[in-house]
Amino acid sequence: MKTNSCIPESSPSRPPPPSRCRRARRVSALFATVSAMAALSCFLSYQRDCARLRGIAAEIAPAKHTPTDRVIALLHWVYGNQSTKENRRFFVVPHMRATPCQVLETGGDCADKSRLLSAMLREVGISASMAMCFDPRSGDPTHTVVVASVAADATMVVDPAYDLYFPKPHPGQHYGLLDLRGDGSILLERLGQLRAELPRSHPIHSYNAECAAYSRASCINWERNGLTRIVRNWLDRDGTGAVHVIPRPLLMEEPKLLVGAFSLCAAAFAVAAFTTVGRLPRRRARMSRECVSRSAAGISGGVAVGAYPCGR
């Protein structure tokens, strides 16, 4: 009777060398540690930025004022702060653009200033989200503004690049994003009013109402691809257009939070890999022992070794 081992050298059930497993676990542990430290660093840096913005915003817009007055006060301040040229600074990668504090320090264009204003409003307890205007002809994004919530059922649109907001005829009330989407004359009338009041040197005279119209404005770019359009159509089943005032996720407006969240996910993946690599040799070793036991039982009972599927 043959007494060949049931686990030949070429068997796939043979456990990997311990040294290989140890190397894999070390790499996983190192990657998890670095990712966790990166996430912690991003979150702490974000908290420091928030504290800085909160202190400045609280001085500009004291809590004793109404939400509307606080929004307008911060709008005026952000408009006059630093330059209006695109901020070339960025966090980690250029695609993320400048953080709110980087805009605070060196200014920026409509998207940069809107990011700063939105962050400062959140720090004084006013919900705010960036929104984009699109060219009605090409559909390309052309301008960025801020939608601020001033009451449970009321929002107002503010434009920090042009120091622009849209008051209604009734004192204390302002037009929201859906109002501007539905009636293009609101923008044109407001521009005409301000151009008549402000000097020619004011940026409002260079506002291009044709390409930076509000007819397709939205907080989230639902036209990005086919999937987002499907989601938009599903959310807008009632046809009210409320889908266009759904706030952008905070991760999309705060680069440090986005990088921190990504690093945290990477750390979790590395921990899972570390655990899996640690269990795999033990599992294979257990399978090998079971296979040997079954083979030994088969030999003693006069059963062919091939009758027992080893290492599967």
Image (cartoon, helix red, strand yellow):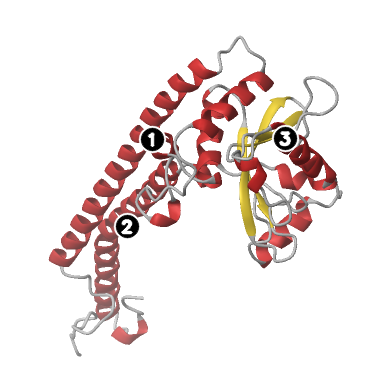
Per the image, label 3 sits on a secondary structure element best described as helix
For this rendering, which residue is in front, 262 or 122? 122
Residue 80 visible (yes or no): yes
Q: Position of residue 140 (x, y in %)?
A: 65, 62
Q: Position of residue 6 (x, y in %)?
A: 24, 81
> What is the quadrant of residue 250 in the picture?
top right
Which mark lies nearer to you, 3 or 1? 3
Disc 1 designates what residue? 105
In the rendered structure, the answer to whether residue 125 lies left or right of residue 304 reads right
For this rendering, which residue is in front, 60 or 269? 60
Q: Position of residue 11 (x, y in %)?
A: 25, 82
Q: Residue at x 34, y 51 (%)?
A: 92
Locate the C terminus by quadrant: bottom left
Question: Residue 273 — which label?
Answer: 2
Instruction: Please name the amino acid that badge 3 sits on.
Output: Leu
Disc 3 designates what residue? 194
Q: Residue at x 32, y 54 (%)?
A: 270
- For disc 2, the neighbor class at 10 Å (few under 14, some 14 to 19, many from 20) is some
- For disc 1, the neighbor class at 10 Å (few under 14, some 14 to 19, many from 20) is few
